[in-house]
Image (cartoon, coloured by chain):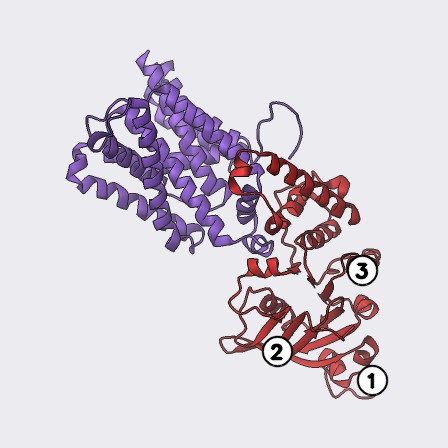
Chain colours: A purple, B red
Amino acid sequence: MDYYLQTLLIAGIFITLTLSLNLINGFCGQFSLGHAGFWGAGAYASAVYTVFYALPVPGPINMLIAIVVGFIAAAICGLIIGVPCLRLKGDYLAIATLGFGEIVRITIMMTEKVGGPRGFINIPHLANIFWVYAVAAIITLFMFNLKRSAFGRAIISIREDEIAAENMGVNLFKSKLFSFTIGAGIAGIAGALFAHTQQFLHPSNFNFMWSVIILVMVILGGQGSVTGSVIGAVVLTLVPEILRYIGGTIAEWRMTIFPILLIILMLIRPQGLFGAHELHFKKSGGA
Amino acid sequence: MSNTLPLLDLEHVTMKFGGLTAVSDVCIKVFPHDLVAVIGPNGAGKTTLFNTITGIYTPTTGCVRFNQNDLKNTKSSAITELGIARTFQNIRLFKNLSVLDNIKLAKHTRIKYGFWAGILRSKKFIEEEKKIELECIELLKLFGLAEKKDFYAKNLAYGQQRKLEMARALATGPKLLLLDEPAAGMNPTETKDLTELIHLIRDQFNIAIILIEHDMKLVMEIAEKIFVLDYGHLIAVGSASEIQNNKRVIEAYLGADIEGVL
């Protein structure tokens, strides 16, 4: 039972994480490879609050505060990295953000107070699966509504054509910085949930590989698609587990089969499962 | 029409890229409701001139004034807000967005609701969006694109894409519209429609228009005043007939020392 719960929990956290990267990568078109860094910053900051500075209030309220702390810490990181780096484009931005992600990880590793390379222990168990999915639902709604508002449109126009976007009166730098900061902040929220459900953090949770996995989830679901991000996160969390569940040779080779499945999917649908589309529940049609 | 203050005033504008002077000491005045053309051989600096007006480049020397505002250090997006809109020589639509969304985007600077109103879908947001959508569809109707509103911009025919780009520029609510080769790649029938459309736009929206164009028939037919650029220099200004008989213009286009041929 614990195993299923844990898998679902991780899937939920990854929904939030994938949505947050989709805001930066899918909506705004800024190629960021340091997303695990924001995740980690949020996780550690919120854990530092609950372990060392927790206020004498009931658990759920402390969890809310921890989420806010995670959001603010990661958003500040996003702002600090965004101001110089968002002047860069494409590959250069990817390299700069990659460097940032590693800086966060190494900084945590060197900080004795949060356990350094031994990991951060004794984090209170304040969140559970309900917290995780409530937050995922709120963020999903946030992204849906953002996409349909003028601010979302402006951000998406930057991905489509920067020069034309600026010519429509969109302030490029402000809009990019906005999506970068908010995207980082939401990753911080996912970090807070991760810290308070797992009760243990280790710097290796937030290394470069995880940035790539989140990116793969975004691309698999479809850049710019909110429903795509949700499905992408769930599918990518569950498929390796399902392969493990089948057992036998397949379980042994699952980490080989899994990338092959990804390659096949990218060959068939290079735009991701959903492209930039959304799943419609009420009315059909529409772009 | 030249009795009021100029809407756009270029004073001795020079634009240098390293050793290359793309635009050299150009003075142009455009008044409200003017319809003027900038012509010149390839590489004469016409598009560079547009780019200095819209803030993509800052002129090396000289100054660009719009409605008495010096545009120096004004961002491209802020210039749009002041009321200059443009189209591009190589169409720059938001290709993966719907036709309607392309136009809605152009209303960006006129949006009245705040960020949280959009996220929480407040009443104001819904009303504003409805109003914007109606305005956009009105505009699309004028360009004959209303029934294509849900198409992706990339799936429109070439001529329609050009029209959409013009509609999008107009949706920003400009006082001055810059058209960079609107007739490029169009057939004679489409060009004729375009001529009418440009007149219609000017009168209906009561704006000034500057166009860059290579189609001389179009230029001679609609431009009230023509500016001729050659190697970055302004070599002639005048009406269509004046330009047609200007010796320097003929030299610029056809070369010198061929007297008797013309």
Residue B11 marker: 2
SS at circle 2: strand
Counting from the top left corner in percent of width and height, residue A36 is at: 34, 38
Nearer the observer, A248 or A245: A245
Left or right side of A257 for B65: right
Among the two numbered marks 2 and 3 on one chain, the one whose residue lies closer to the N terminus: 2
Q: Earlier in the sequence, mark 2 or mark 1?
A: 2
B51 is higher (above) or lower (below) than A183: below
The image shows residue A250 at horizontal and vertical percentages of 37, 19
Q: Position of residue A47 (x, y in %)?
A: 25, 32
Q: Say above or below: B73 vs A228.
A: below
The chain to which mark 1 is attached is B
Disc sitting over residue B203 in the figure:
3
Q: Earlier in the sequence, mark 3 or mark 1?
A: 3
What chain does badge 2 belong to? B
**Alpha carbon of mark 2 to alpha carbon of mark 1: how far?**
37 Å
Instruction: Tell me: residue B239, above or below residue B205.
Output: below
Say which quadrant the N terminus of chain B sits in. Answer: bottom right
Q: Which mark is residue B261?
A: 1
Q: Residues within 10 Å of mark 3 (few under 14, many from 20)?
A: few
Instruction: Report the quarter where the C terminus of chain B lies.
Output: bottom right
The residue under label 1 is which amino acid type? Val
Q: Nearer the viewer, residue B214 or B60?
A: B60
In this rendering, the label closer to the viewer, 3 or 1:
3
Residue A35, how many percent across, how many down?
Answer: 36, 40
Question: As shown in the figure, which amino acid type bears the numbered disc 2?
Answer: Glu
Which element carries disc 3, helix, strand or loop?
Answer: helix
- Report the residue at 76% width, 66% height from top: B33
Chain designation of label 3:
B
